[in-house]
Image (spheres, rainbow, N blue to C red):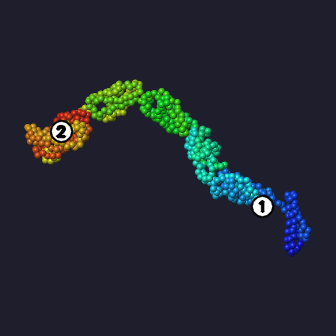
């Protein structure tokens, strides 16, 4: 609008005229729009001023849509709307949310520039389903709302899958746990497999109720290595567990072959097999012996090369088949073809140990068995430790025994053994029985000594008498059941009449040490007296080994005892009832006190 009037013209008049012109112009535009729907006009008023008005109207609301959000939202997530306006342009877009199915809208954000995106902190709302919309306003003030898009907020929901195992075969039970469900509804849980490292997930089983377990048929998948996961469905949304990696599916049985162990078999045998498995690997191979449906485990191997040692003596003699049973790590089992008609010949022979000390003719016995015919059992001897064997005797029938004439060998220590010979000439040797002592020489007394412990030349308390034998004696032959421990007793001194006084053990009456000729007067003629004593025995080393020494200690004195001043040698006459460890009776030859002539006691 322009005016030719001076600027200082009455302002009220100018305002009134302009208002009148504006009202008239609007009225004209309205009339025009009513007819044509649009307007483009110039209005001129003939006054002392001239006015010109131009206008374009925007009565169309903007176009707006809500970009589909992810089916599951958690944490801070981006939400986006799309809005356009061809006339005046988009002024702002507001993105809102409301609990699913409700109309209580809450603004997430308002944005003025495209792309119309903002961050939604979903932790500010409870888990659950939500509707989302966008409201756009154009620069003319027209407003439009989008259609709703549904999503689910699941900040607390977690899905976990128990590892079903490292190696799987057949139908496998799986266990899934869904936690922090809250008000959400889990419609189903499925278990999926994908080749390791890929995202080609395939559903293998589905569960629709707690506990979320289902059985996966691994035979539907090719043998190989897989990743496994569980996926929970909440409405139209899904939530996956962490991936369980590198699970081997193996429904293919291993291969196995038994190597011929040969025949006959005896003792501990090494068995060889060949086994392989392309997927899970071999867990174990068991070698078995038997026939038909009756098989016995012989040995087990768990690593390549698949060999193991088995004790065939546990099988018993006879004819067997041998086979290998391989199990892979997934549990698939394969049994090899059996190697049939293999003979176990476990001949055994044992020499029954005779007594340690041997004399005279000794019966030796052996125990023998074999799956074949026994030709003979031979018993042999060797000087101890020499390993130079000489036959003692041979027997061809059971029970296997024969006589060892020990007098035919030199006294000493020997080893003994038995040798079994089968009809095919195969020989089996027993364990060696060591340290058997051949002794055909009678023991004897070698010395008798006395010591003074009281009044010199008188038998009284403190004196001792020492008997020394040539070898170790059987103490129970001196006194029944005796171990050599100190034993209380009595000695009797007999006064001689025109003969030597004697001394012997009078109690216990069965104590057999023989008699001492004292060759001096320690008692009145024909007068006897006794003294209490303690008797003990020990073994002492000698050149030929060990020997027995018996000591009598006088514990009491008799008033009838005489004191002798005559030097003399005591003479000991041993008892023949005393034997050595081999049972040889002691020589009764007199033993004269050794050393210089002196007064005894």
List the residue tagged with mark 2. 509
Answer left or right for 16 relative to 323. Answer: right
Q: Percent position (x, y) of residue 211? A: 57, 46
Q: Nearer the viewer, residue 529 or 568?
A: 529
Residue 511, image quadrant: top left
Q: Is residue 362 visible?
A: yes
Q: Percent position (x, y) of residue 539? A: 24, 41
Residue 577, image quadrant: top left
Q: Nearer the viewer, residue 399 or 432?
A: 399
Residue found 61% across the figure and 44% down from its top: 207
- Is label 1 or label 2 in front? 1
Q: Percent position (x, y) of residue 470? A: 22, 37
Answer few, some or many: residues within 10 Å of disc 2's Cα (few below 14, many 20 plus, some between 14 and 19): few
Answer few, some or many: residues within 10 Å of disc 1's Cα (few below 14, many 20 plus, some between 14 and 19): some
List the residue tagged with mark 1. 141
Answer left or right for 554 relative to 120. Answer: left
Q: Is residue 82 visible?
A: no
């Amino acid at each position: 609008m322009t005016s030719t009037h001076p600027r200082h013209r009455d302002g009220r008049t100018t305002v009134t005229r302009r208002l009148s012109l504006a009202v008239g112009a609007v009225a004209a535009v309205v009339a025009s729009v009513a007819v044509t729907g649009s307007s483009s006009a110039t209005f001129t008023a003939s006054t002392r001023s001239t006015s010109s008005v131009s206008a374009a109207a925007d009565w169309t609301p903007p176009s707006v849509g809500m970009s589909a959000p992810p089916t599951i939202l958690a944490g801070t997530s981006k939400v986006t709307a799309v809005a356009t306006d061809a006339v005046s342009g988009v002024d702002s877009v507001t993105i809102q949310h409301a609990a699913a199915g409700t109309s209580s809208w809450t603004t997430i954000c308002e944005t003025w520039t495209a792309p119309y995106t903002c961050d939604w902190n979903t932790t500010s709302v409870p888990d659950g389903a939500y509707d989302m919309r966008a409201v756009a306003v154009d620069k003319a003030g027209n407003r439009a709302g989008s259609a709703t898009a549904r999503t689910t907020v699941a900040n607390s929901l977690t899905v976990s899958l128990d590892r079903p195992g490292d190696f799987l075969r057949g139908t496998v039970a799986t266990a899934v746990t869904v936690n922090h469900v809250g008000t959400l509804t889990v419609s189903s849980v499925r278990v999926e497999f994908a080749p390791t490292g890929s995202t080609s997930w395939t559903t293998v089983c589905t569960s629709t109720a707690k506990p979320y377990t289902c059985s996966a048929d691994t035979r539907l998948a090719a043998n190989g290595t897989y990743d496994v996961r569980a996926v929970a469905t909440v409405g139209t949304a899904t939530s996956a567990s962490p991936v369980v990696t590198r699970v081997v599916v193996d429904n293919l049985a291993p291969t196995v072959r038994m190597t011929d162990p040969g025949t006959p078999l005896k003792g501990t045998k090494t068995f060889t097999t060949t086994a392989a498995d392309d997927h899970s690997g071999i867990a174990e191979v068991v070698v078995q012996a038997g026939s038909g449906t009756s098989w016995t485990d012989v040995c087990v191997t768990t690593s390549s090369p698949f060999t193991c040692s088995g004790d065939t003596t546990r099988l018993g003699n006879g004819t067997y088949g041998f086979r290998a049973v391989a199990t892979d790590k997934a549990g698939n089992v394969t049994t090899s073809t059996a190697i049939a008609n293999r003979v176990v010949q476990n001949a055994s022979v044992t020499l029954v140990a005779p007594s340690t000390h041997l004399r005279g003719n000794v019966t030796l016995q052996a125990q023998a068995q074999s799956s074949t015919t026994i030709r003979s059992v031979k018993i042999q001897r060797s000087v101890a430790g020499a390993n130079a064997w000489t036959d003692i005797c041979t027997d061809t029938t059971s029970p296997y025994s024969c006589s060892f004439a020990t007098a035919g060998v030199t006294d000493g220590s020997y080893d003994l053994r038995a040798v079994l010979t089968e009809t095919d000439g195969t020989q089996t040797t027993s364990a060696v029985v060591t340290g058997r002592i051949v002794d055909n020489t009678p023991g004897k007394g070698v010395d008798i000594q006395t010591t003074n412990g009281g009044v010199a030349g008188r038998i009284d308390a403190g004196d001792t008498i020492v008997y020394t034998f040539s070898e170790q004696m059987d103490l129970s032959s001196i006194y029944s059941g005796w171990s050599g421990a100190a034993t209380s007793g009595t000695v009797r001194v007999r006064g001689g009449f025109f003969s030597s006084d004697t001394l012997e053990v009078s109690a216990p009456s069965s104590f057999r040490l023989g008699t001492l000729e004292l060759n001096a007067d320690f008692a009145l003629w024909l007068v006897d007296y006794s003294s209490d004593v303690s008797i003990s025995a020990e073994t002492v080393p000698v050149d030929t080994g060990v020997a027995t020494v018996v000591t009598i200690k006088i514990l009491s004195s008799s008033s009838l005892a005489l004191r002798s001043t005559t030097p003399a040698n005591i003479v000991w006459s041993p008892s023949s009832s005393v034997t050595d460890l081999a049972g040889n009776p002691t020589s009764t030859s007199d033993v004269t006190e050794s050393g210089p002539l002196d007064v005894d006691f």
